[in-house]
Amino acid sequence: MDESRKIIEFKGIARSFDGQMVLKGVSLDIYDNEFVTLLGPSGCGKTTLLRILGGFLTPGEGRVWFKGEDITALPPYKRDINTVFQKYALFPHMDVYDNVAFGLKIKKQPKDVIAQKVMRMLRLVNLESCAHRSVNELSGGQQQRIAIARALVNEPSVLLLDEPLSALDLKLRKEMQLELKRIQSEVGIAFIFVTHDQEEALTMSDRIVVMRDGEIQQVGTPEEIYNRPVSRFVAGFIGETNIIEGAMAAEDTVRFEDKNFPCTQRGFEAGRPVDVVIRPEDLHIVRREDGMLKGVVREQVFKGVYYDTVVETRLGTSITVKMHVSEDKPVVNNEAGEMISANNFFLDASDVDELDDPRVVALASAEAWDAATGERVSIKSVEYDIKKAAGAYKVTFSTAEDTSITVEAVVREENRAVSTVFREEIYAMDFFVKTDDILDSMALDTDLRTWANASAWSLTDGAEVAVTEVRYDFDADNIVPGVYDVTFSTLGYRYRVSTTLCLPEETEVGLSFDPEDIHLMAKEGGG
């Protein structure tokens, strides 16, 4: 970048709200006549940074420089910077002309000068014919252009735009993306645009600043950000992508899915773990026998000009457990007017030493209640003698009125499955439930994971691995007592592919790609 064109410098900007850091020492340079987009999820700090530049907030630490001058303490009206907010804040009692002219009138400029400037701005935004219409009669897109004209008529050196397209419908938003870029090119000043929409950023920007948790993750052109992301976050946030764990087999060869593939990216030594990025549009579905990878179509969603297709090349790590379903038959104590219920439960031998009464109550889902009112009754005693040896042990729960129920705790060794391919381990245990537990569940997959205590983790670094798939062999709406298989799986190798081919699910296909379509990233965590 030409340093003589530098117009804005953020130097170590930090800001907190209620003790929570929103910006963490952000430093960034912005140059004259460029369209810069601050892109990131909600809460990443992008709007806070914009408001600090506009003078509406002061940083807790750091300085803001504008054209070589420290403006950190300068009020908004003294900055050569204007802002277009998400809510356009037009004056409803004024027509279009007077809305645009408002700032010039405040500055007491001559009427003829105001007329020239206002009409020039209205021509710029293609609304010259609407000069004397009420702003209430205009569409959302027209109102937005009036807000832009009102900001530009004061001839600022920088225009700030805080998610100005978010209230527009999809078609109008796409039109306004191109319109904004045209306006920026014609007026020749810096635009700083805040959005969480990746398409907006890619369409309009000269440079994109990707932010996360108050920090800048990457700065670059749209092409650089899209094709050469520096992290999993950036790769996943900028459009759909496939990220696969791999390792360098040689300087120009990467290994993933137990195969070696040529690549063109250099700079990683042999043996180093890497993340492999392949964009959906760079994958091609071919005949299975011609594929560099072989898989099965799992999903297809029509997107208008292409099909968003998921191809699974290998199943994840799986484990199957037994779900024992019974009908709820609470014990009734007519004399006390109480009822009590509990389930049999499974227990790992390694967990026996950590048992206490509350834990046993929770494992058995034990509860007691007043038969007439349904109000809960305290369980006063829990009697058990559970040992680490495999077997079934009696557990008795009782209330103060001697309403009691006895169930079995079944002790077993831990149920685990290991995948040497994925270098991960998955765990789950058999479990008991009542038919009503299934029928009343609002999120059955989640409840099944909870009941089975299903979890998975990496054998490389111990990090948690998501259990993403739950399969079972029963009808949840018509469950009857019995024993059922429930299988939990981590995510296997799945690839998103953009294709014009319409393919039924379960179609066997091949996937191909070119060496230059592989992008490599240093594995996060320094692996």
Image: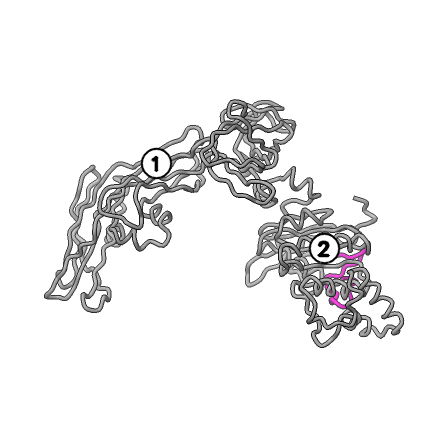
User: For mark 2, what is the residue?
Assistant: 192
Does 368 appear in magenta?
A: no
Q: Position of residue 32 (x, y in %)?
A: 80, 52
How many other residues sit within 10 Å of disc 2, few (<14), some (14-19) or many (≥20)? many
Q: Is residue 34 above or below residue 298?
A: below
Please tell me in which quadrant of the rendered image residue 253 appears: top right
**In this figure, what is the number of numbered marks?**
2
Is residue 65 shown in magenta? yes
Q: Residue at x 76, y 70 (%)?
A: 96
Helix, strand or loop at disc 2? strand
* 321 relative to 126 in the view: left or right: left
Where does the image place residue 342, in percent across and percent down from the top left?
Answer: 21, 53
Q: Nearer the viewer, residue 300 or 186?
A: 300
Residue 426 vs residue 272, the one in the foreground: 426
Quadrant hosting residue 378: bottom left
Q: Residue furthest bottom?
A: 93
Q: What is the spatial separation of the Cα atoms under label 1 and label 2, in whole angstroms?
A: 51 Å
Q: Which numbered dot is residue 119?
A: none
Above or below, 105 against 259 in this view is: below
Span colored in magenta: 64-81
Q: What amino acid type should be assigned to the residue bearing mark 1?
A: Ile
Q: Which residue is mark 1?
A: 319
Q: Is residue 81 left or right of residue 228?
A: right
Name the one closer to the observer, 288 or 487: 288
Q: Does 470 appear above or below 365?
A: above
Relative vertical location of residue 33 with respect to residue 108 in this rendering, above or below: above
Q: Earlier in the sequence, mark 1 or mark 2?
A: 2
